């Protein structure tokens, strides 16, 4: 079974440009998450999809970030326009459906996309 | 907001020794998970312990959870050079209907052959 895949693995763009990151979750995983780690800081949650719906987008830093998951399969995260502070590693993760009483399942992470904004 | 803290930040041991990493958190949780990240690679899920569990084992890994102290520890026994990596704890908050994980800063483990 294929794991979570992310594309591209690296992206170098100039400030003000647009970048779109893609994540393909494990087949059958309804839950999809985006996280990022900026240099020297902890991994931070961005948002959570359940199928195509945004369950929690409390971690999105500002309106320059737009996440979509059309059809409930793969997801994209667009940064427009990119700023220097957006540089970091963007991780995607997926998990099975949540169980009862808010129980959670293991999240399986992709290899990440390293974004460098110059 | 909740922030996990891990201790120590860096650990260097000899192959064959045991490695212990600690994690503290601030709010109520559903579960706590440990992940490993090898240099330049993605996060690999190691073990999940639920809030009503106190100890869990998986191979050479032993995880404990003390919800009264809001802390967890990860013990790697008989370490190997291949265990060299960064280790992160991540908590799943019990409040709100969210699946987000809150990560600690991580512990960098170096196992010398």
Image: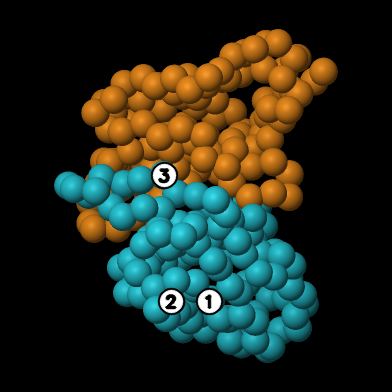
Q: Please say if B3 is above or below B89.
A: below
Judged from the image, the secondary structure of the residue bearing numbered disc 1 is strand
Labels 1 and 2 within one chain: yes
Q: What is the residue that sits farthest to the left in this orientation? A: A101
Q: Which chain is cyan?
A: A
Question: How is colour applied across the structure in the image?
Answer: by chain
Q: Which chain is orange?
A: B
The residue shown at (44%, 42%) is B90
Disc 1, disc 2: CB below 8 Å? yes
Instruction: Name the residue that disc number 1 marks.
Output: A76
Judged from the image, the secondary structure of the residue bearing numbered disc 2 is loop
Instruction: Name the residue that disc number 2 marks.
Output: A69
Determine the CA span between mark 1 and mark 2: 7 Å
Residue B91 lies, in percent from the top left, at 39, 43
Q: Please say if B102 is above or below A16.
A: above
Residue A33 falls left or right of residue B8: left
Who comes first in sequence, dot 2 or dot 3?
2
Can I make out residue B106 in this image?
no
Q: Chain of mark 3?
A: A
Q: Chain of mark 2?
A: A
Q: Toward the viewer: B76 or A72? A: A72
Q: Please say if A24 is above or below B96.
A: below
Instruction: Name the residue that disc number 3 marks.
Output: A106
- What is the quadrant of the C terminus of chain B in the image? top right
Labels 2 and 3 within one chain: yes
Q: Toward the viewer: A110 or B104? A: A110
């Amino acid at each position: 079974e294929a794991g979570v895949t992310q594309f591209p693995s690296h992206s170098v763009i100039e400030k003000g440009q647009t970048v779109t990151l893609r994540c393909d979750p494990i087949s059958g995983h309804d839950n999809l998450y985006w996280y990022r780690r900026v240099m020297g800081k902890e991994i931070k949650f961005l948002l959570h999809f359940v199928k195509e719906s945004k369950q929690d987008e409390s971690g999105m830093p500002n309106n320059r970030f737009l996440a979509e998951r059309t059809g409930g399969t793969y997801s994209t995260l667009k940064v427009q326009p990119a700023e220097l502070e957006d540089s970091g590693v963007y991780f995607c993760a997926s998990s099975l459906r949540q169980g009862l009483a808010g129980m959670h399942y293991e999240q399986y992470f992709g290899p990440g996309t390293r974004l460098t904004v110059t | 907001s909740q922030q996990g803290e891990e201790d120590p930040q860096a650990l260097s041991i000899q192959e064959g020794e045991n490695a212990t990493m600690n994690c503290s958190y601030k709010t109520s949780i559903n579960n706590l998970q440990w992940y490993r990240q090898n240099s330049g690679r993605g996060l690999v899920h190691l073990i999940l312990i639920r809030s009503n569990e106190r100890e869990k084992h998986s191979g050479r890994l032993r995880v404990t959870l003390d919800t009264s102290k809001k802390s967890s520890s990860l013990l790697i026994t008989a370490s190997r050079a291949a265990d060299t990596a960064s280790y992160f704890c991540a908590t799943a908050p019990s409040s709100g209907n969210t699946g987000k994980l809150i990560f600690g800063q991580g512990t960098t483990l170096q196992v010398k052959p």
